[in-house]
Image (cartoon, grey):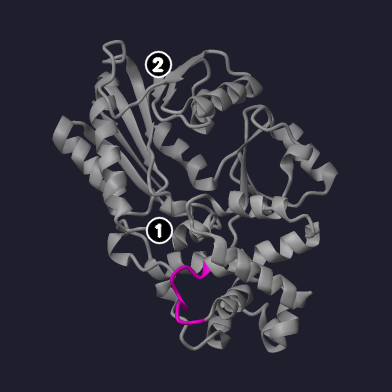
Amino acid sequence: MYRSHLRTAVQILCLYDGKTPFANFIRQFYSKDKKYGSKDRKSISSLCYSYFRLGHSLKNLPIEDRILNGLFLCSQGKNELLEYFYPEWNRAVELPLQEKLKLADPSFVLKEIFPWQEELSEGIVHEDFCRSFLVQPDLFLRMRPGMRGIVMSKLTDSGIRFREIGEEGLALDNSTKIDQVLLPDREVVVQDLSSQKTAEIIRGFDAPINAWDCCAGSGGKSILLQDLFPGIKLTATDNRSPILANYKKRMKDAGIKNFQCFVSDLIKPIGAGFEGQYDLVLADLPCSGSGTWARNPDSLCFFDPKSIDRFADLQKRILANVVSGIREGGRMVYITCSVFRKENEAYVEWLSQQFGLQVENQQLLKGYGLKADSMFGGALRS
């Protein structure tokens, strides 16, 4: 069985080309071959993700050896497959990571996991960031206003283990099925810890009346804005109509009615109806997503560094258009889930120099030591 699982993992990894998210790819693989039970699927998937978590290290080794090194370094407890292939590693699997690194393949170099150190935002500790890829991030929840008692009671009664973070945050095991216990968006929002911390940047504002979530996605930041400023009038845009359909559903589930949303391609000039209309423009822009790669390590393995400039160019084109939506005295909050300087502080500087916006706050939200994503946020006043 163990050799079969390893062979299947190798087969999957050889077929995968990185053009679609690996989670989607492996689901399609299993759907075409029904012989794998749930335990098999879980084991094989774990082997594949162990391979991805090594990033760009140990590329000199055969795939099988990379998988097993990854399994050893990423496992937090003993497992049968590791016992079968490397019992000495299984005996040492619960040691601190620094000790395990001494027992892995001698050619392993931690810093090679993420080889683009020179592109990182200032303040990112490269070695610590690389180490974070060997750890599965937590699932983070933000309790909505007035829901703390209900949420805590439900989690306690269900026996789900959790850890409290501040007044609103919770951390759970990544595999927890919270929708079987809690009402998503009504009682809690699935929101990474660093994403929750963007509230610290937004809270510094005078209470806005009108806000424009210009790259709204599925609406997590819109719900955060409503919770921070009850009664706020929200406008949401995105260039993907299916995404906005999901946005509307989430707003309904969250009980939010005071909003409007529509499709808009923001690499084109915005209409006159947007200009100078908003107390707050929230620009959570498309980016490399490099701060989330511990959660999606397949993206790390297939990343083309040339895309940093492509994303940076896209961000510049969007910002150049949406900045005119800020009313005089209003503010913009610029957010990415990137760790690359060209996508982060470089654009706060650019907005200040190009449009005369005053930088009020900027923060690198380092989640890599907290089993969370890493993000960047900057607040600027018109």
Residue 371 in sight here = yes
Tell me the residue at 67%/79% (across/down).
93
Q: Amino acid at mark 2?
A: Asn
Residue 65 locus on image (x, y percent): 58, 81
Helix or strand or loop: what does disc 1 sit on? Answer: loop
Callout 1: few (<14), some (14-19), or many (20+) C-alpha neighbours within 10 Å?
some
Question: Does 336 sit left or right of 348 as displayed?
Answer: right
**The disc labelled 1 sits on which kind of residue?**
Phe
Image coords of residue 358 (percent x, y): 21, 33
Most frequent secondary structure within the magenta stretch: loop
Q: CA distance from mark 1 to mark 2?
A: 37 Å
Looking at the picture, how far across and down is residue 52, in whole percent?
Answer: 53, 65
Q: Quadrant of the C terminus?
A: top left
Residue depth check, mark 1 versus mark 2: number of the one nearer the observer: 1
* Earlier sequence position, callout 1 versus callout 2: 2
In this rendering, position of residue 198 left or right of residue 9: left
Stretch in magenta: 53-61
Is residue 239 magenta-colored?
no
Q: Residue at left 61%, top 46%?
A: 140
Label ID, residue 102 = none
Tag on residue 303? Answer: 1
Disc number for residue 210: 2
Marks 1 and 2 in Cβ contact (< 8 Å): no
